Image (cartoon, grey):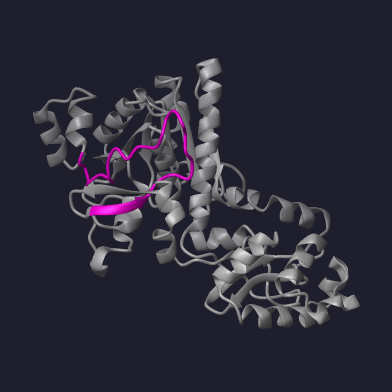
Amino acid sequence: MTDAALEGLRVLEYARMVSGPYCAKLLADLGAEVVKIEQPSLGDPARQKGPFPGDLPHPEKSGLFLYLNTNKLGITLDVQTEEGRKVFRELAQGADILIEDSPPGQMEELGLDYESLSALNPRLIVTSITPYGQTGPYRDRKSYHLNLYHASGHSAFVYIASSEAEGPPLAAGGLVGDYDAGLTAAVATLGALFWRLHTGEGQHVDISELEALVGLERVEVNHFANNPEPRRWPGMIGGLVPCKDGYVVITAAQDHQWWALVELMGNPAWAKDEKCSNEFTRSQHRDEIQPRILEWMGQHTREEIYHQGQRLNVPVGPVRTVEEIAGWEQARQRGFFAELDHAEAGRLTYPTAAYRLSETPWRGERAAPLLGQHNEQVYCGRLGYSPEELARLAAEGVV
């Protein structure tokens, strides 16, 4: 079997919920061996989050946890104990990368920060993911996804279906901002790994979840930094539009996009009005133009609008439901979904990866680990602990 892209890379994950585990998952999906460290008995809080099969909560059947932790090994370890910290250092000595999301200063108090661990393993890369980063006046503030998403400005950088410049902020569904931070962390970690290939030295990667979100809106942030007058893009034509059987999204700001849309709508007489002649006039008269577009869209289905729009080069796409995506022929034929067996949750279908590597394809090596499933494999097989020592550590609550 062909080696995976990151075959041989050893990663420790000491992180919870989404950002850190997603960062580690992306590396695991590329072939890195990821050992996920969880608190004994309790485990990652994601185990308590749904959805659950049949809506029956179970720590081994959380859809969130199962998705975020495919292709990982799982162990338990309490670093609040002196012996637990000793074991952690042993694990770090044999690792290439540590991904952690502890509050700033906490790992230093435990003697497990980058400076302490790099003294034992100079090649170690430590990626720390926190709400605001390791420095700055906000570094010690706690925050959740809801806080960060709105603090980043994402809820203001939206196209709204109104010509009013002000409007209520809009939140994204799920924990999308945490995934964005995890993706940013994975890219930065691979950059540090690339640098290590040339120097042989590790480094500390400081990830601010807030900055990861702000960075995704760099165009808008640049505008506001240089032109402080607020705007909510009131003049956009199209946007999220209801149709006969759901919604479509249309981008028709530029002239060539607009005239393609006009052709899609059958070249109505009202489109010949001077108000529709260019981007500026259309923006000024959006409240008159948009209802006419809505009227036409409401008479056609998503597929009609999408396929005819594609033929005419209209930037338009259907808004699909999760159920539709799961059964979509395009994703199925490309192998985007794969089935994995889990000891408790059974055989389930998982999203895989958005890329296709011709020489090192994605592989589903294993489903998410049970709590402490690989303790013996890691502690005895890698660190050389005897079964009796492992049993003692378990009895004392260290693992």
**Can residue 367 be found in the magenta stretch?**
yes
**How many numbered marks, from 0 up?**
0
Q: Is residue 79 something that shows in the picture? A: no
Q: Main secondary structure of the magenta part?
A: loop
Residue positioned most to the right: 274
* Quarter residue 47 falls in: bottom left
Q: Is residue 157 something that shows in the picture? A: yes
Residue positioned most to the left: 388
**Can residue 313 be found in the magenta stretch?**
no
Residue at the spot x=34%, y=46% of the render?
A: 69
Name the spot of residue 58 as percent of width and height, x first: 22, 60
Q: Is residue 75 above or below residue 123?
A: below
Name the spot of residue 17 as percent of width and height, x first: 39, 52
Q: Is residue 384 left or right of residue 39?
A: left
Q: Nearer the viewer, residue 65 or 12?
A: 65
Magenta segment range?
347-373
Residue at the spot x=82%, y=72% of the render?
A: 283
Q: Quadrant of the C terminus?
A: top left
Name the spot of residue 132 as percent of width and height, x first: 56, 49
Residue at the spot x=87%, y=77% of the render?
A: 275
* Quarter residue 32 falls in: top left
Name the spot of residue 291 as percent of width and height, x first: 72, 82
* Quarter residue 310 falls in: bottom right
Q: Nearer the viewer, residue 106 or 17?
A: 17
Q: Is residue 163 left or right of residue 369?
A: right
Q: Quadrant of the N terminus?
A: top left
Q: Is residue 213 above or below residue 99?
A: below
Residue at the spot x=65%, y=65% of the render?
A: 309
Q: Is residue 254 left or right of residue 388?
A: right
Q: Nearer the viewer, residue 62 or 13?
A: 62
